[in-house]
Image (tube, helix red, strand yellow):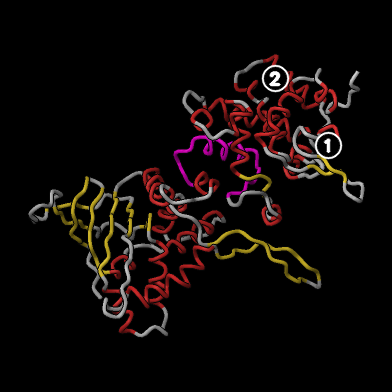
């Protein structure tokens, strides 16, 4: 089938038009999201990839959720059980290869008399500006002008919305078991495409977040990781990456799988540590305008303060950054971790006296889990093997007590965690 390099659409703005094309046009003129995802990993390992794919892969990584996630698998190597990192399908890929593929064939491809299937429109992105010409077409009652767009000079585009439908179509087209007549029906079905061209990468990333997160329940950590407008997250990533500390971008708590991959903290928990430097420990936990606002924040100063203070913290412990996940250390609990991080405000404000006080706290406090910490960072219990353990506790409930214990050594709690008598 001939795929034209010129299409007609309704001009919505200088960088946006709407068109209706055969499904085959979408398949042929866009790089699969799975291909771009694989290419992004190859690029990180300094492997060679197609130049156009190399251009689109970083953009796609900011626009879409992954098809594959990091996992672990136990294998027998040389008679020993060894844990190895693997890539496992996300629910997104499972659905694409399963129910979505079946829907396209059984509901969408066939005639309305056989079944009634619908396919939402696609949102397409080209980094280049497509060549526009007025089409001299007038439709009564339609305000937007018609135009033709040439993309002979451009490579294939990427999808900000619809990459699962695209991949399902690609898999169907490559499947020799699907009858050719049914493939032709599917490929010739008309679909709507919103085309954005010549816009910055940040705008493309925002477009994905708005399409997929507004009005749709998306877990907090997923949205935080991909939304380029979240300056707290951008600052957090920069700080932890400079320190060489891996963070997890999935899940609501740190799991064994995260730990096996060297990930020591959830991205959203790391964000709380960073925010606390500027707005204080308690506000870092609160979901309100003040906690979410970055108005007036000096992010260069925040980066310096975060890197400097967190490096001092992790250098203090023989475990290094592993202390974040060490069950024998109270730093593992959210409240204590953020309370200690908030002392980095001294570095942000360049307060020499407060800097020395923060360092004194780091030196004097006994950070090992003990009954002295009960009720401060969480609940301390002793199991049947006489092993002391501490629950993570609720950050909102414990944060005030944790801050007071760290910053007020004369209080009962402050003396207890420093190993001093109550007298």
Report the side of 64 relative to 157 (left or right): right
The image position of residue 188, as x and y in percent, is 26, 74
Q: Real-space Cα distance between discs 1 and 2?
A: 23 Å
- Secondary structure under badge 2? helix
Relative side of 221 to 257, left or right? left
The residue at the point 23 percent across, 52 percent down is 17
Relative image position of residue 364 (x, y in whole percent) = 82, 25
Nearer to us of marks 1 and 2 is 1
Q: Is residue 307 left or right of residue 96?
A: right
Q: Earlier in the sequence, mark 1 or mark 2?
A: 2
Label 2, residues with CA under 10 Å away: few <14, some 14-19, many ≥20:
some
Give whichever of 130, 228 is nearer the camera: 228
Whether residue 229 appears in magenta in the rendering, the answer is yes
Task: Give the magenta range.
Answer: 226-249
Splitting the image into 4 quarters, where does residue 44 fall? bottom right
- Depth check: give the residue in front, 374 or 350: 374
Residue 262 is marked as none
Relative to 191, residue 344 above or below: above
Q: Tell me whether the residue at label 1 lies in contact with that at label 2, contact meaning CB atoms closer than 8 angstroms.
A: no
- The residue pinned by badge 1 equals 368
Quarter of image, res 416: top right
Q: Is mark 1 on a helix, strand or loop?
A: loop
Q: Residue at x 30, y 70 (%)?
A: 24
- Residue shown at 75%/38% (left/top)? 378
Does 53 sit above or below residue 336? below
Residue 266 is a magenta residue: no
What mark, if any, has residue 355 been given in the picture? 2
Rendering coords of residue 126 (x, y %): 32, 53
Q: In this view, does 197 lie above or below 80?
A: above
Instruction: Tell me which residue sits at (47%, 26%) in the image.
Output: 295
């Amino acid at each position: 089938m001939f795929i034209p390099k010129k299409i007609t659409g309704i001009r919505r703005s200088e960088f946006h038009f709407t068109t209706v094309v055969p499904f085959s046009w979408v398949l042929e003129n866009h790089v699969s999201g799975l291909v771009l995802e694989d290419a992004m990993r190859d690029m990180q390992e300094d492997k060679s990839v197609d130049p156009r794919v190399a251009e689109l892969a970083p953009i796609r990584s900011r626009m879409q959720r992954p098809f594959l996630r990091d996992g672990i698998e136990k294998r027998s190597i040389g008679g020993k059980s060894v844990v190895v990192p693997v890539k496992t399908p996300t629910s997104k890929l499972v659905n694409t290869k399963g129910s979505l593929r079946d829907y396209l064939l059984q509901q969408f491809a066939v005639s309305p008399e056989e079944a009634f299937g619908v396919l939402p429109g696609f949102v397409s992105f080209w980094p280049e500006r497509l060549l526009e010409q007025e089409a001299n077409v007038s439709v009564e009652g339609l305000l937007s002008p018609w135009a033709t767009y040439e993309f002979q000079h451009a490579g294939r585009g990427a999808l900000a919305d619809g990459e699962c439908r695209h991949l399902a179509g690609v898999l169907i087209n490559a499947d020799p078991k699907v009858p050719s007549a049914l493939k032709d029906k599917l490929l010739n079905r008309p679909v709507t495409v919103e085309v954005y061209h010549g816009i910055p990468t940040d705008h493309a990333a925002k477009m994905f977040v708005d399409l997929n997160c507004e009005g749709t329940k998306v877990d907090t950590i997923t949205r935080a990781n991909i939304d380029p407008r979240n300056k707290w997250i951008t600052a957090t990533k920069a700080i932890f990456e400079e320190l060489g500390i891996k963070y997890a971008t999935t899940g609501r708590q740190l799991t064994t799988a995260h730990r096996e991959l060297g990930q020591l903290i959830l991205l959203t928990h790391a964000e709380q540590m960073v925010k606390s430097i500027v707005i204080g420990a308690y506000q870092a936990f609160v979901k309100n305008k003040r906690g979410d606002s970055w108005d007036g924040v000096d992010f260069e100063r925040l980066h310096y303060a975060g890197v400097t203070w967190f490096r001092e913290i992790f250098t203090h412990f023989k475990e290094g950054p592993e202390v974040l996940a060490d069950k024998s250390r109270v730093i593992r609990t959210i409240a204590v971790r953020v309370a200690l991080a908030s002392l980095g405000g001294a570095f942000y404000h360049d307060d020499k006296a407060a800097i020395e006080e923060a360092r004194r706290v780091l030196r004097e406090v006994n950070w090992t889990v003990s009954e002295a910490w009960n009720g401060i960072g969480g609940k301390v219990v002793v199991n049947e093997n006489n092993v002391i353990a501490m629950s993570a506790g609720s950050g909102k409930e414990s944060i005030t007590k944790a801050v007071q214990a760290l910053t007020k050594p004369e209080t009962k709690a402050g003396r207890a965690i420093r190993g001093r008598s109550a007298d």
